[in-house]
Amino acid sequence: NAGVMQNPRHLVRRRGQEARLRCSPMKGHSHVYWYRQLPEEGLKFMVYLQKENIIDESGMPKERFSAEFPKEGPSILRIQQVVRGDSAAYFCASSPTVNTEAFFGQGTRLTVV
Amino acid sequence: GENVEQHPSTLSVQEGDSAVIKCTYSDSASNYFPWYKQELGKGPQLIIDIRSNVGEKKDQRIAVTLNKTAKHFSLHITETQPEDSAVYFCAAFLDSNYQLIWGAGTKLIIKP
């Protein structure tokens, strides 16, 4: 059973471009969480999704950011018109149900130049 | 809403000594408390967790204690080794909003 897979591991985008971050949860996991982490800081919750549904997006900026978890395929975190301040590590985690251990991917490090 | 405070932010201990990291939470309805270890350049990894119906849990050199009355929980690492050096995060889960609320992290440094 492969762990949570995130790709790409590193992503460089110019200001104004779009960034697409992918997360394939562990097999059998239907709950996905996205977090953002700045260097030397903790994890900031962005969004919680179940298959085809956004459960809680209270941590995600209203503008430029969106997330989906389709019936088939990985969860996608999409950042439109990236700015320098979007540079961070973005982590995805999955769990089989709520209130159980969440497994993290290795993260995608986004650099906006 | 729930708030989790974690202390200390940095902890330096001699190899072989014990390390203790403490977290407090604000919402008495929180019922699940995991601890994660994050090594440089990697994602957080669950190392131990505890539920609110248990007071203590051990796994080899790692233990977690929970005091529901005082609303705090602690991570204990005994006989520390160089590979224990990492950032450790505590978290508290609240059923009402289906979220893990995270502490700010503790950077643990093991001195040889």
Image: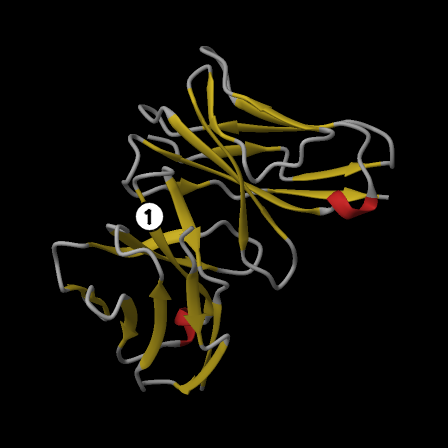
Up/down of A45 relative to B52, above or below = above
Report the label total: 1
Secondary structure beneath dot 1 equals strand
Apparent side of residue B95 relative to residue B100 in the rendered image (left or right): left
Instruction: Tell me residue A64's x, y (percent).
Output: 73, 29
Instruction: Tell me residue B6's x, y (percent).
Output: 43, 69
The structure residue drawn at horizontal position 49% and vertical position 60%, both measured from the top left corner, is: B39
- What is the crowding at mark 1: few (fewer than 14 residues within 10 Å), some, or many (at least 20)? many
The structure residue drawn at horizontal position 27% and vertical position 80%, both measured from the top left corner, is: B79
Q: How is the image coloured?
A: secondary structure
Instruction: Tell me residue A69's x, y (percent).
Output: 50, 20
Instruction: Tell me residue B4's x, y (percent).
Output: 41, 61
* Badge 1: chain ID: B
Up/down of B80 relative to B97, above or below = below
Name, please, the residue furthest toward the top: A71
Residue position marked by numbered label 1 in the rendering: B93
Looking at the image, which is closer to me, A64 or A51?
A64
Instruction: Assign the C terminus of chain B to one quadrant of the image.
Output: bottom left
* Quarter of the image where one finds residue A30: top left
The structure residue drawn at horizontal position 36% and vertical position 76%, both measured from the top left corner, is: B81
For badge 1, the amino acid type reads Phe
The structure residue drawn at horizontal position 36% and vertical position 37%, both measured from the top left corner, is: B98
